[in-house]
Image: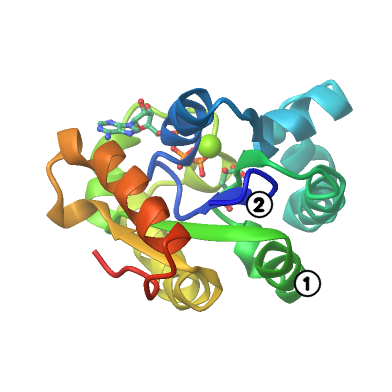
Amino acid sequence: MSANANLILIGPMGAGKTTHGKWLARQLGRRFVDLDAHIEQHTGTSISHIFDLEGEAGFRRRESEALAEVLASDGIVLATGGGTVLSEANRALMKARGTVIHLHLPPEQQLQRLAGDRKRPLLQCADRAGRLQQLSEIRTPLYRACADIHIDLSRMPMSKVRHHLIECLNERAEGAEPHHA
Ligand SMILES: Nc1ncnc2c1ncn2[C@@H]1O[C@H](COP(=O)(O)OP(=O)(O)OP(=O)(O)O)[C@@H](O)[C@H]1O
Ligand SMILES: O=C(O)C1=C[C@@H](O)[C@@H](O)[C@H](O)C1
Ligand SMILES: [Mg+2]
């Protein structure tokens, strides 16, 4: 794997992009950037507050600007937000600027994992299960279309996720076909 290539994690809320991204960056001695945290640092406020003030459209504009800014760098590990793939321009940029890794988690498992969450604005609704299902139907094809590597976390014991991540990246570096776990 070239040290210059960015590694870009995509996937739904709660899949573990931030958690595994931090680990991967430490493991590879790379700089880690979390797109949501970057937006919060640069605006000085929370994502929820941005949604309140500017709506989802305002947040998406900020997200696209932040993505272009951070992907001007080389060699980073980037954890994106769950909805970063919604924009075609974002998808094209990610594909052009790095190896894109899709962490797949089905809505039922997202629901369990994010049960206590109060800070993801799209989940602050009465029917969380329905919302997660709806988002999954719209977004899963976009994650799949954008990614070079797919890891299905639903069929994998958690202890293996990280090992598998490294294995997929090594296979790819050796010129193997994109891996479907
Ligand atoms: N392998 C795992 N097993 C159990 N819980 C996990 C695992 N990976 C992540 N989590 C937990 O799931 C929650 C969400 O993880 P994380 O914030 O990394 O997701 P994300 O993909 O970055 O979500 P978002 O798109 O909303 O930023 C966290 O509380 C995290 O501790
Ligand atoms: O799935 C989404 O659209 C989002 C996921 C989070 O990472 C944040 O980017 C924000 O809460 C929106
Ligand atoms: Mg995250």
Quadrant placement of the C terminus: bottom left
Q: Nearer the viewer, residue 120 or 3?
A: 3
Residue 89: give its label. Answer: 1
Residue sitting at 55 percent across and 60 percent down?
A: 100
Q: Residue at x 48, y 28 (%)?
A: 118
Q: Nearer the viewer, residue 28 or 154?
A: 28
Residue 132 higher or lower than 92, as above or below: above
Q: CA distance from mark 2 to mark 1?
A: 19 Å
Q: Is residue 147 left or right of residue 66?
A: left
Residue 117 placement: quadrant = top left
Name the foreground residue: 101 vs 105. 101
Q: Is residue 76 left or right of residue 79?
A: right
Residue labelled 2 has its Cβ within 8 Å of some atom of ligand 1: no
Report the amino acid beneath label 2.
Ala
Q: Secondary structure at mark 2?
A: loop
- Give the labeled residue for mark 2: 5
Of the two numbered discs 2 and 1 on the same chain, state the one appearing first in sequence. Answer: 2
